[in-house]
Image: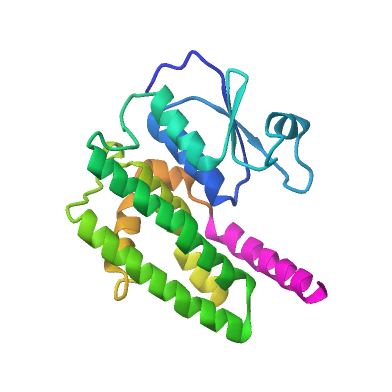
Amino acid sequence: MEENKSKVTLHGMWASSYSKRVEIALKLKGILYEYVEEDLSNKTESMVRLNPVHKKVPLLVHDGKPVAESQVILEYIDETWNNSPRLLPEDSYERAQVRFWVSYINQQVIEVMGKVLFQEGEAQEKAIEEARERFKVLEEGLKKHFPNKIIKENDDVGLLDIIIISTFGSHKVYHEVFGVGVIDQVNTPTLYNWIESLKELAVMKEAEVPSDRLVPFLQMYRQRHLQQAANA
């Protein structure tokens, strides 16, 4: 474990995939940290003060210095604690490919997942078809650019893996909540097996959100959003 002589605090929320990204990175690097669970409807004074622009989780505070936005935090962690595993490859082309597919997940896939989550009826059916198309692009990209990916230990994990497991690790829960599965062994075998390999690591099991807690949360979150949309 990396010797830690500095104070690190993570402000997060248990169901946030963005908070989970940072939590996993800290655990992988062996960085000791204090965790502050935020109630997003009643945020702590310190988080609002230290993150005045977005006032969102995750927020990393390192020796009193705040770092916001999950993607920025992950790169900050890798540059500040340069022990293994390194989150970005040394090779510049490989690094570019990782950044491209991380960006694709962040911008294209998460957006359409939100549409599936917060719509119903015909609009949701359309969103599901759109999601399948975007997951198909992701599947082909992973297969083409990372053909020899093997995950057996923490040192095999990098930035793209963290984004994949935090974003898609609970895909079976989403299937249970919505009755629709987009990630499976038939249509997205590369992505499916990638997730399953990551879930075998002890650090991922430690960070996993229990499905019996996540299912009712997602159901409540979805219903609240649909009611707000109906009343708008």
Which image quarter holds the N terminus? top left
Residue 73 seen in render: yes
Residue at 59 percent of width and 64 percent of height: 215
Farthest-out residue, left? 148
Q: Is residue 226 magenta?
A: yes
Q: How many marks?
A: 0
What residue span does the magenta drawing correspond to? 210-232
Q: Is residue 34 above or below residue 21?
A: above
Which image quarter holds the C terminus? bottom right
Farthest-out residue, top? 5
- On the picture, is 34 further left or further right than 110? right
Q: Is residue 215 magenta?
A: yes
Q: Is residue 38 above or below residue 220?
A: above
Q: For the stretch drawn in magenta, what is the main secondary structure?
A: helix
Residue at 50 percent of width and 60 percent of height: 110
Judge by depth and name the residue closer to the eye, 104 or 165: 104
- On the picture, is 124 further left or further right than 78? right
Residue at 43 percent of width and 34 percent of height: 75
User: Where residue 102 sits in the image (x, y, percent)?
Assistant: 40, 51
User: Where residue 86 sits in the image (x, y, percent)?
Assistant: 32, 32
Residue 199 seen in render: no
Quadrant in which residue 79 is drawn = top left
User: Where residue 2 sits in the image (x, y, percent)?
Assistant: 38, 21
Judge by depth and name the residue closer to the eye, 1 or 106: 106
